[in-house]
Amino acid sequence: MAEIGVAVIGFGLAGRVFHAPFVSAVPGLKLEAIVQRRGDEAAKAYPKARILRSIDEALNDSSISLIVVGTPNETHYDLAKRALEAGKHVVIDKPFAASSVEAKELIELAAAKKLILAPFHNRRWDGDFLTVRKLLKAGDLGRLVTYESHFDRYRPLPREATWKEAANDANGMLFDLGPHLVDQALALFGAPQGITASVRRDRDNTEIEDAFDITLHYPRLQAICRAMMLAAEPAPRFLLHGIRGSFRKYGLDPQEPALVGGATVPPLGDARPWLGENEDAWGTLTVAPDLAEPGKLIRTSVRTELGDYRGFYVSVRDAISKGTPLEVTAEDGFRVIRLLEMARESSTQGRTIPVEF
């Protein structure tokens, strides 16, 4: 397989933790370059990669076929458009774009140029999400009636000197964590019939939307996506209730904290595992074997499936080199952004909005 040259644009949290390590670990992809405007962190971390100081250098480099946009949210559309116009395949970190209009324009441009365009919805490869998907496929809960997915943090004071706390419609919790939670719900249940949301500013001093509750309405099912910055005691990451019982799971996938702490992602195919969750963090399945006796419940600890963000880049590699369908499509990215816009509309208008794409 001919190697696909990759340039990662940006070396903040996204490029350093979520992109460069996993690009480097997937055979068939070559981390050719990292665009870091200043500083030497990228050079120290990846001495074999060329360090470029401008995106133009990457766009004009014939050895680079894939551009990964890992820059501040408000720059995603412009940089992705420039990369597509230069004939490069593109991965865009979430959010896919700042608006559904921008997202649709990028999709049309990629299609016209016959290029791969993929939103980085890597949380489909979280171990806890894979566990939920497996439980639902197995039917352990019976017919599902409520699905709750939380990303809770405790940051009562805004962080200083970060674009993530700057006033911009592309920033804030809705467009930071909302893409992950909404994309996971769409991956499990498809398009909802309606959406009801509260998008707000809970902290005393904040320039961004720092909390949201989104309910996606399906026939006989409510899928609830929530995030906030005032959760000193976080809610379960997942809480599912069905006719036969419930599943509760606390804690976040361990991949991000492991990488922040200095872990190295082994190459795909390496015998070293990546990355199991400790048993004390596994979820609990509670079911009634006999629905006529609901007081007799059986509780079982459920081993968390292995999460692996390398799977995202395997999908991108194969789409470029073999023409296989992407696991996360550009249309998926558009639908997520459109739903986030509708969440704002619902919150502002105080009503449930029918979903149309």
Image: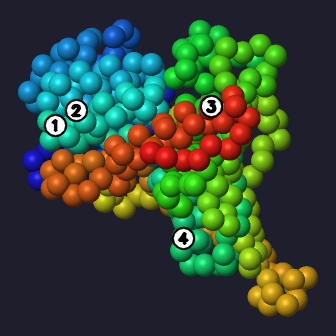
| Residue holding disc 2 | 109
Label 1 or label 4, whichever lies nearer to me, is 1
**Residue identified by numbered label 1:** 112
What residue is pinned by disc 3? 344
Q: Is residue 47 above or below residue 238?
A: above
The local crowd at label 2, few if under 14, some if 14 to 19, many if 20 or more residues have their Cα within 10 Å, is some
Q: What residue would you read off at disc 4?
A: 134
Of the numbered discs 1 and 3, the one sitting upstream in the chain is: 1
- Residue 21, percent across and down? 37, 38
Asked which secondary structure carries label 4, the reply is helix
> Please, what is the three-letter code of the amino acid marked with disc 1?
Ala
Which of the two discs, 3 and 4, sits closer to the camera? 3
Instruction: Pick whichever, 273 or 222, lies toward us.
Output: 222
Q: Is residue 165 visible?
A: yes
The answer to whether marks 2 and 1 mark residues whose Cβ atoms lie closer than 8 Å is yes
Q: Is residue 51 visible?
A: no
Q: Is residue 346 above or below residue 243?
A: above
